Amino acid sequence: MRFLSFASMLLAIGTLALPQAAPAAPRIKDIVDVENVRANQLVGYGLVVGLAGTGDRIRNAPFTEESLKGMLERLGVSVQGTQMRTQNVAAVSITATLPPFARTGSQIDVQVSALGDATSLQGGTLVASSLRGLDGEIYAVAQGPVAVSGFKAQGAGASITRGVATSARIAGGAIVEREVRFAFNSAPSLKLALKNPDFTTARRVSETINREIPGAAEMLDPATVQITPRAGSVMDLVSRIENLEVTVDQPARIVINEASGTVVMGTDVRISPVAIAQGGLTISVSENPIASQPNPLSDGETVVLPRTSVSVEDGDGGGLAMVGGGSSLSSLVSGLNALGVSPRDLITILQALKTAGALQAEIEVQ
């Protein structure tokens, strides 16, 4: 037992003696968007067939009937004057994202969502449908069996629902028919847009690029860095600089989600020395009804008498506690943890600190 303890101590000392690896800085390609290199949204309309009676009710969704008749007419089936009664078809909207540099013949994923009163798309197949961009041009054609992650089962007196059965996905369900052209090689310069605009970060990006390729980068504003190739094409320049590492600066910000009670703080959050007193008032109300029965052979009735118990607990929170000093985020967290506050109380305390002027950070409430 002594040998194990001594070995554990040596291991702990050796771990402390090892140099701590510095965190890797993000690459330029991870913090910027390249000008005109973006995805395009596609949308379409179609029919999902083969449903087991869970499709649109034709009388409630006339557009489904019209679409079904139109599809059959195009396939050479005359349905003029015919009254449709099927519930195996559902009208759906189709959405997809066309990634940049997608080539003709490549496949992309599509999302299918019911438009009518269909209860489930489980087991259905999307009939060939065109996907258009905002310019009205057809960029892809989608077709294939849909995959539904949710389900719904119901009977006469109960039902079970998990997920959304009226929304489905088709992996690789659309084939690209038209390309979006990107003329990079003919461009004399290119702009890099920072995903999180910041003066310091933009300057660091520009300086990092210029150290690798002198005179190739210029900071235009907190969100834009312009690059100009001194030799070769813009494409060659982007490929040379995209893996360069840059230390990203971030503002002092606290993000609060009141719905879930989540609090996220940036590492640059500072707080001036301040005293905080935190306490809570807890009121508990419980109901314990009792049954009062009449004596045997009497004319009385059994009645239920309410019995309520109310208790009040006034928490003092431990009095005043000193928090802060402006040194680091760890001192702020340690001070607040010393108060034993819950996430809900922490939100109130942070907002009060901001009002008092003791918190040097921006608070964003979601």
Image (cartoon, rainbow, N blue to C red):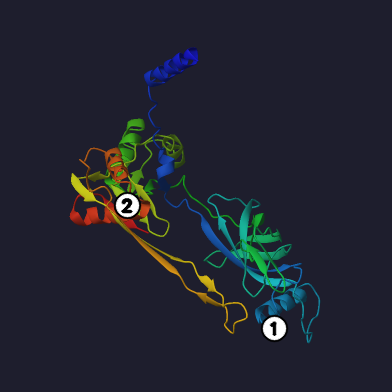
Residue 59, numbered circle: 1
Q: Mark 2 points at which residue?
A: 346
Residue 125, numbered circle: none
Of residues 3 and 208, which is closer to you in this image?
3
Of residues 113 and 234, which is closer to you in this image?
113
Does the image show residue 302?
yes
The residue positioned 76% from the left and 68% from the top of the image is: 52
Tag 2: amino acid: Leu
| Residue 216: % across, % down | 34, 38
Question: Quadrant location of residue 151?
Answer: bottom right
Does the image show residue 165?
no
Q: What element carries label 1?
A: loop
Which mark sits nearer the N-terminus, 2 or 1?
1
Of residues 317 and 76, which is closer to you in this image?
317
Tag 1: amino acid: Arg
| Residue 316: % across, % down | 27, 52
Q: Nearer the viewer, mark 2 or mark 1?
A: 2
